[in-house]
Image: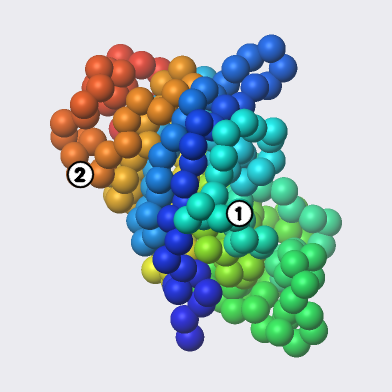
Amino acid sequence: MASAAARDVMPLEVRGLGVRLGERQVLSGVSFRLDPGRRTVILGPNGSGKTSLLRALHGLVPSTGSITWAGAPRPRGAEAMVFQRPVMLRRGALANVEYALAVNGVKGAERRRRAREALERAGLSALAERPARVLSGGEQQRLALARAWALRPRILYLDEPSASLDPAAAQEIEREIGAIHASGTRIVMTTHHLGLARRIADEILFLHDGRLVEQAPAERFFVAPRSDEARQFLEGELPWTTV
């Protein structure tokens, strides 16, 4: 059954986005357009503003400028976000997913059905009643993705989703991201791992010192970046890259 996300044809448009945290201007004049059906990976060295951009897109930090869908205000409930360190409630894995659905107005049998479906897709059905906080780091991250997926978001923001995980757990996260994308949800994520970015990305947003330096198709960015900052980053001359 096609989800609402699969039918989404609206571009996400960002114009002149700025974010100030305390005395520091962390993003300035960031403008871009994200079309449906593409996986966008945000790259950049430490302190470039990657996480702040995700948080601003999701409305978690005050920002200036505009963020619209095809020129209109963002639809309510159309977005979800998974953090690098997922927040787990003091309840079982299934109950964590059900709670998110309840908060978003999904009721009764439909809530239970969608929660179980999300766990099954993430390969976590056997852990449905296990307390979420005793799960391994990789299992918690997969649960966080399942919880977000159950909401049927049109766009999913992921902040370093496989950071600090062992290779096997990171591979599971990558598989789940691919399945979420295949279901019709747009993916926008940060990572410091260039190998993951090469495998997942359709396009790259490259940030440096709080500004968008380059937006490019992934296949071109990794072969022939147009900016000196991106070239230095890919060659390891700027911090926070993992091949």
Report the colour scheme. Answer: rainbow
Q: Which residue is nearer to you in this view: 126 or 155?
A: 155
Q: Is residue 35 visible?
A: yes
| Amino acid found under the numbered disc labelled 2 | Glu
**Residue beneath the point at 60% across and 17% down:** 25
How far from the left and from the top, in percent, is residue 231? 24, 22
Specify few, some or many for label 2: CA neighbours under 10 Å numbering under 14, 14-19, or 20 or more.
some
How far from the left and from the top, in percent, is residue 48? 48, 22
Q: What residue type is labelled 1?
A: Pro
Q: Quadrant of the C terminus?
A: top left
Residue 204 x/y as whole percent: 33, 40
Q: Distance between the residues labelled 1 and 2?
A: 32 Å
Is residue 139 in view?
no
Above or below residue 228? Residue 56 is: below
The structure residue drawn at horizontal position 63% and vertical position 14%, both measured from the top left corner, is 24
Q: Is residue 33 left or right of residue 199?
A: right
In the rendered structure, find residue 73 and report the number of the disc placed on it: 1
Image mark for residue 219:
2
> Which image quarter: residue 129?
bottom right
Q: Which of marks 1 and 2 is in front?
A: 1
Q: Give the structural element (helix, strand or loop) at label 1.
A: loop
Q: Residue furthest left?
A: 224
- SS category of the residue bearing label 2: helix
Compare residues 12 and 121 and report the one nearer the observer. Answer: 12
Left or right side of 194 for 130: right
The quadrant where residue 221 appears: top left
Q: How many labels does the image show?
A: 2
Picture residue at 31% right of the left edge, 45% below the top = 203
